[in-house]
Structure formats: structure tokens, C-alpha cells
Image (tube, grey):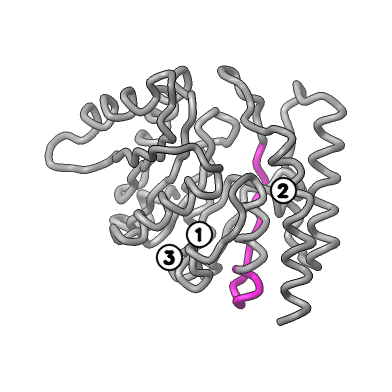
Amino acid sequence: MTGHDRYPGVPVTIVMPTYNEAANLPRMAELVLGLPIDGLHLKIVDDSSPDGTGRIAEQLAEKYNWDGRRRMSVLHRTEKDGLGRAYVAGMTAALDEGAAYVVQMDADGSHPVEAVPRMLGTAVASGVGLVVGSRYVEGGSLDEEWGKHRVLLSRFANRYARTVLGTKIRDITAGFNLWSAATLRDVDLATLDSAGYSFQVELKFKAVRAGHSAVEIPIRFEERTEGVSKMNLSTQIESALVPLRLRMRNRRG
């Protein structure tokens, strides 16, 4: 059964940060809003993309918000200060608007949209606070176009963060996650420090520390077909330092 069949009306917001994703966004919006989930809402968080992504997002919202249904919204931010900050803004808005579950998803097509109903079903059936779309559990995989160097770096980053933080989540760096509203409120999004990709690690670590359980389901992670990756040296350095900082703070606590 799909999420539509079993959980009609459950408010689910997919938060999708964007920066220069004009080529990908129309297709992603079509796929997401075509999912069989009655209470689904897509929230784009755009960091003033110079390629006009924000304008395209507004046009798409006009297209999909018909017959009195508000299925898509756009949150415009005036500065580009990191993926983590964009997610905090979007997730906070989703909670304020009454979302029962919040999904993190990239706009580049790397995350399988069709997995969202399965993630929702897992969360509702099990009562866990976090469902991770995982590349590193049995059945999970990476696109063959990923070079050997990138695969090794990704696996090392996950093993490093798991070891430092003592967590059992195999894909702790994953960016495709479904959260219950209660879990996000317990973590208190405003207290998160990470600005970049390490936000994924910090949020999961704090959720587990707060007593919330996580389940990983396998996904296939695809290579983006349009645009370029936003990963750079500064985000890589932050990703290395954040687990150590979290571990030290936890010890002091």
C-alpha cells in the first residue's frame, strides 16, 4: 500500500534547499507533487540563486496551488550561508505550519522521490523519530558514475563520524531523511551550529542523544544530471571538525 492508501491527510512537508537549480527544479517539483500522499507539501528554500531558481519556484507554486490547495511554497533567503542554515529555516517554517513529518531532499535528483511513501510508512508504523534513506545498509547503493575516490571518501566520512560519535547509524552523513515533528522540536533546530553539510551529522547525533530511535531503509543514490555539486573545501573541513566538537561537548556535558 502507498502512503496515500494508509495515511490520508497526514501533513508531510518536503523541504528542498536550492541554489542554482533552475535546470532541475521543474522536474523535481513534478515528481514530488505527483507522489500518492494526500497531505504532501513541497517547500523550496532558495538562497537568492543568480540563475533564477527562486523565480521559477514561484511560477511552479502558482501552477500547483490550484483549487484552493496550497501544495507548494517558496521561502526566499537573502544570503547564502550554508545548507544547514537553509534547512533550519525551511524545517522551522514547516513545523510552524503544522507538518507532522518533515523530509529533507536534495533538488538535484540524487534522492529517489519514489522512496518517500516508504519512508513515511516506516515512520508511522514503527513510531521512530527518524527514517534515513541509506546508501550503506543492505540493498543500498551508489550510482556507478561515482568515481572510486568519491566512493572511498564518502565511506570514510561515514565511518569516521560513526566512530567519533559512537553511533550505530550507518549513513550518518545522509541528506535524505524523514523526521517526526516531535523529534525536531526536541532537538531544537535553533541550537544547531553546523552551517554546511555537517548539519546532517549534528542533527542525527542530537536526535539520538535526545532518545529518539532511527531506522535506515536502503536507497540508490544517483549522480546529478544537471548543475554542479556545492561541496567545497570549507564544507569538507567543517564536516571533519564537527564530529570532534560534538564529542568534546558531550564529554563535558
Question: Residue drawn 73% across and 75% down?
Answer: 250
- The structure residue drawn at horizontal position 75% and vertical position 80%, both measured from the top left corner, is 252
Which segment is the magenta one? Answer: 207-220
Q: Are marks 3 and 2 in contact (CB under 8 Å)?
A: no
Q: Which mark is residue 179?
A: 1
Residue drawn at x 76%, y 59% is: 243
SS class of the residue under badge 3? helix
State which quarter of the image contains the C terminus: bottom right
Q: Secondary structure at mark 1?
A: strand
Q: Is residue 155 left or right of residue 9?
A: right
- Report crowding for label 1: few under 14, some 14 to 19, many 20 or more residues within 10 A (C-alpha): many
Nearer the observer, 251 or 5: 251
Dot 3 and dot 1 residues touching (CB under 8 Å): yes
Q: Tell me which numbered mark, 3 or 2, is placed earlier along the sequence.
A: 3
Distance from label 3 to label 1 (Cα)?
6 Å
Type of the residue with mark 2: Glu
Residue 226 higher or lower than 253, as above or below: above
Residue 235: say if magenta. no
Give how far across and how far down residue 246 sits, in percent: 72, 66
Instruction: Label 2, secondary structure: give it.
Output: helix
**Residue annotated with mark 3:** 181
Q: Position of residue 8 (x, y in %)?
A: 31, 55
Q: Residue furthest bottom?
A: 253
The residue pinned by badge 2 equals 238
227 relative to 73 in the view: left or right: right
